[in-house]
Image (spheres, rainbow, N blue to C red):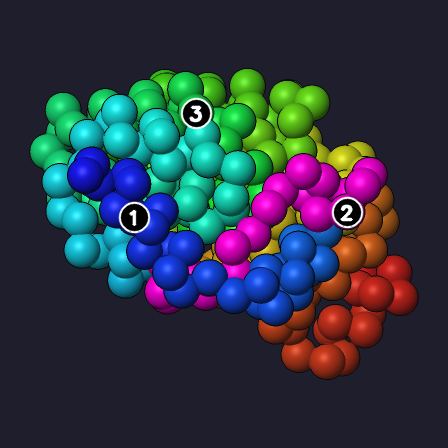
């Protein structure tokens, strides 16, 4: 039996209908919501990781089968395989994973799938390839919610190396973004910048705080001391 079938069988063996119902609600899978059309088996993330960890050598064809599966946790398993391949691979293998990931973005189709993989694949690959970072700006201009989220969340890898330029540039692009999930993502990345250089985050906020969506601002200033946080919220900076 091939690896993808084994992984699917193991996930099905620990599935929980009750947990699946909870997850379907949490990830907004109802009609007209951002996760519409997604299906869950009801398996926790640590369990998915544990199952994937048993299979050390999975080729891209097998990963493709996992990504094309309708169940969220199966796609998640396939993405965890890619993260692992990237982490242990040489430069040639990392490039293959990066390119494969880009070709299969349609399967990275909920916020957790983005957040758990984009910084570890796209962001990590682009760390020392500033010219190639233009792909993030292309994704930022996409009409697809998940591609836009990938654009900003990938920059977490740069932030962790005290490289903030692309995060701030892409954040500026999203100041007029309407979706709440993007407000949260951008606010989170701005907060991460502030953890490393508060002056740079505040320079951005003081330039744009009057036009930053409320949720984005709340996420960005979450760690500020209370007095300063209230000033931002009351437009008294």
Q: Badge 3 local density, few (<14 within 10 Å), some, or many (20+)? A: few
Q: Does residue 104 lie above or below 176 as drawn?
A: above
Give me the residue at 37% from left, 36% from top: 66
Magenta residues, start to end: 29-48
Q: Which one is closest to the eye, mark 3 or mark 2?
A: 2
Give me the residue at 34% from left, 28% from top: 64
| Mark toward the start of the polypeptide (3 vs 1) | 1
Residue with the mark numbered 3: 104
Q: Secondary structure at mark 1?
A: helix
Q: Which quarter of the figure is the N terminus placed in?
A: top left
Q: Nearer the viewer, residue 226 or 156?
A: 156
Residue with the mark numbered 2: 30
Q: Which mark is residue 198?
A: none
Magenta includes 32?
A: yes
Q: Which one is closest to the eye, mark 1 or mark 2?
A: 1
* Residue 182 x/y as whole percent: 68, 44
């Amino acid at each position: 039996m091939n690896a993808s079938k084994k992984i699917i069988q193991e996930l099905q063996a620990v599935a929980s209908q009750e947990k699946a119902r909870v997850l379907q609600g949490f990830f907004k899978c109802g009609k007209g919501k951002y996760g519409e059309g997604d299906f869950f088996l009801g398996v926790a993330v640590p369990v998915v990781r544990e199952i994937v960890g048993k299979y050390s050598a999975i080729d891209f064809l097998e990963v493709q089968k996992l990504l094309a599966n309708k169940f969220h946790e199966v796609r998640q398993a396939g993405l965890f395989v890619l993260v692992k391949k990237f982490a242990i691979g040489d430069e040639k293998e990392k490039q293959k994973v990066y390119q494969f990931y880009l070709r299969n973005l349609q399967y990275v189709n909920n916020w957790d799938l983005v957040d758990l993989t984009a910084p570890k694949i796209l962001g990590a690959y682009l760390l020392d390839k500033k010219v190639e970072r233009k792909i993030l700006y292309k994704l930022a201009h996409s009409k697809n919610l998940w591609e836009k989220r990938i654009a900003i969340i990938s920059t977490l890898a740069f932030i962790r190396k005290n490289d903030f330029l692309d995060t701030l540039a892409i954040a500026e692009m999203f100041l007029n973004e309407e979706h709440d999930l993007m407000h949260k993502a951008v606010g989170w990345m701005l907060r991460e910048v502030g953890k490393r250089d508060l002056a740079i985050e505040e320079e951005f906020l003081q330039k744009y705080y009057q036009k930053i969506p409320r949720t984005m601002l709340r996420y960005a200033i979450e760690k500020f001391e209370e007095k300063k946080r209230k000033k931002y919220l009351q437009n008294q900076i």
